[in-house]
Image: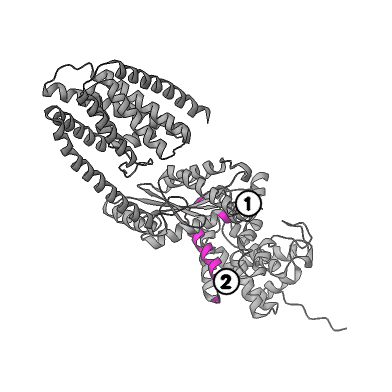
Amino acid sequence: MPSRLFAVVVPVCAIGFAIAVAAAVSLATHAHSGAELAGIGAFFAASMLSARFPVPLDGLDTGGVSLGFVFAVGAIVLFGWDAGVIVAFAAPTLAQMIEHRPPARIAFNAGAFALSAGTAGALTAVVHGNGSTAVLAQVAICASAKYVLNMTLVTGAVAASSRRPFSRSIVSTLRSTAVPFALMASAALILVIMWERSPGLSAALIGPLLAIGLYQRSTYNALRAMRLALTDPLTGLGNHRHFHDRLELELVRAREQDGQLTLCLVDVDDFKRVNDRFGHPAGDHVLSELAARLRQNGETFRLGGDEFALLLPGCNEQDGVVIGEAVVDRIAALELKQLGSVTVSAGVATFPVHASGRDELIRLADGALYWAKEYGKNRVRASRPDVVELAELKHLASGPDRAARFRAAASLARAVDERDAYTGSHSERVAELSARIAARLGLPAEEIEFTRLAASLHDLGKLAVPEEILRKPGPLTDSERLVLERHPQIGFRMLETLGVSPVADWVLHHHERWDGCGYPDGLLDEEIPLGARIIFVADAYDAMTSERTYRHRLSTIEAMTELQHCAGTQFDPEVVEALAEELDLVPEREPALAS
């Protein structure tokens, strides 16, 4: 037993059992009439029967509440504290023993029942008299004291066992049980009044109490059946169907109230590795633990497999990212015995900032999640146009529609250019120029199109470079340059699963120099893929002829002269010559002099 739980259980059991013994001694040593003993026996039997068939309550994790509360309160008011303790303590304890509950739980519950009943009996004895006002006060004090103390003790044990905050647990418990226990207190008052009039009349309460119990049980079962149809059986979270229903409802509310709604999709990183290495039971354990943590952040759903969703009504994009980061950090800090640690990635999209409808909101959040997993995992990403276009490009790469693939690439390239310091559509211009150079070199039509695609995406990795570096109005520091020079590798990782292998390779090597002094791999002359050499020349030409924040553009002739000057060191001479021919900038040769 955990030390925190031990510190709660042992004192309650010790004090409760002491009170129970004192009550038994008191009851045995004081004279009672046969009618009183019969009444105590009847209340004991009714309490035990009630304990065997508790009334379930929606929102309460335990098996339900017992109508034995009515008979315990009635016994305290009618027959004294000692009789009330025996009814409250012995009847449910015997019922739990018949059901073979765990001994430690039986002991704690028995101690809590005796302690709460003894305290209620002591407080009730303060009120004297037999009038209606006195009876009302006695029942109110007794019921309130027994309820509050019993709920506090039970909730304290549950909080210590589950390591949940006590304050949050007690508020939730009181919210779920206050109304039912208030109704049972009213029933106890009626029982006391009818018993004092005539014990036989109190039997008339059996019908209403039985009807209440049966109605509540049938209602609970109906609600439970409905909930099961909308609940994931492994995690207890809402399932895929429930998610779509709730998302549609929250979107309607957001539209009516002119508010915002943020969707956060969460996915376990490398979950297949967990299943393959430790087995599916271990994977199920990971999902259950993850679900328990996600519940703390908002209404949570399991969409299937290892993907979850958080609905955050009223949250803007920034708040959604903060919550997503809290989820990522909480899961990363989780240690799962032999499994070690696991991580998750998250994608965030907000209505109406990013999307205007349900399907679009899901698509954007899914695209952001895709980006988070592609770029390092264990992170959260808010939706951006480039995120969605990359996901769409990946999807199109596996399909036969080449035109759609190029449209997606062009759209993604525009998103890249919007973050960079170039004016206009730099990626589009480089793509067009690269295709013309490839055609001038006599490459096959398919390679020309591959060159166009790779050139349009050559700066894709810059999406991961901070914008203040991309737009810096002046030379970069050494550390800033190192960050910028990582963009070919980042772009390669993003594109390597496109299904068009040359594209990723050419993007990776489009900053390699002919003399071997380029990056990232320092390839030399023809070790560099031809497509990458073409893109390097086209990229340099467009950069020189574009207006920048820290220098003016060069003329076409000036730029071409610079390329020709660096041919054979920085650039492939053949590619530079092809560009010059394509731009019709090859100087005319002077005719040879006749001898």
**Between residues 180 and 100, which one lies in front from this camera angle?**
100
Q: Viewed as shown, does residue 166 lie left or right of 547?
A: left
Whole-Å distance between the Cαs marked 2 and 1? Answer: 32 Å
Nearer to us: label 2 or label 1: 1
Amino acid at the residue labelled 2 = Ser
Residue at 34 percent of width and 55 percent of height: 225
Residue 495 location (% of width, % of height)? 61, 63
Q: Against 43, is 415 above or below? A: below
Query: Percent from the top left, x then y, of residue 272?
Result: 60, 56
Residue 227 in view, yes or no: yes
Which span of residues is magenta-colored?
A: 373-401
Q: Tell whether label 1 touches label 2 (CB within 8 Å).
A: no
Q: Residue furthest front?
A: 34
Amino acid marked by disc 1 = Phe
Figure check: 380 above or below 49? below
Q: Residue at x 49, y 61 (%)?
A: 388
Q: Position of residue 86 (x, y in %)?
A: 32, 26
425 left or right of 500? left
Crowding near pointer 2: few (<14 within 10 Å), some, many (20+)?
Answer: some
**Vertical comparison of 100 with 149: above or below:** below
SS at mark 1?
A: helix
User: Is 382 placed above or below 40 here?
Assistant: below
* Number of numbered discs overlaid on the protein picture: 2
Residue carrying label 2: 398
Render colour scheme? one colour
Quarter of the picture containing the C terminus is: bottom right
Ranked by sequence position, the earlier of labels 2 and 1 is: 1
Is residue 554 visible to the viewer in this orientation of the structure? no
**Disc sitting over residue 278 in the figure:** 1
Mark carried by residue 295: none
Q: Which residue occupies 38% across, 46% down?
A: 315
- Which SS class for mark 2? loop
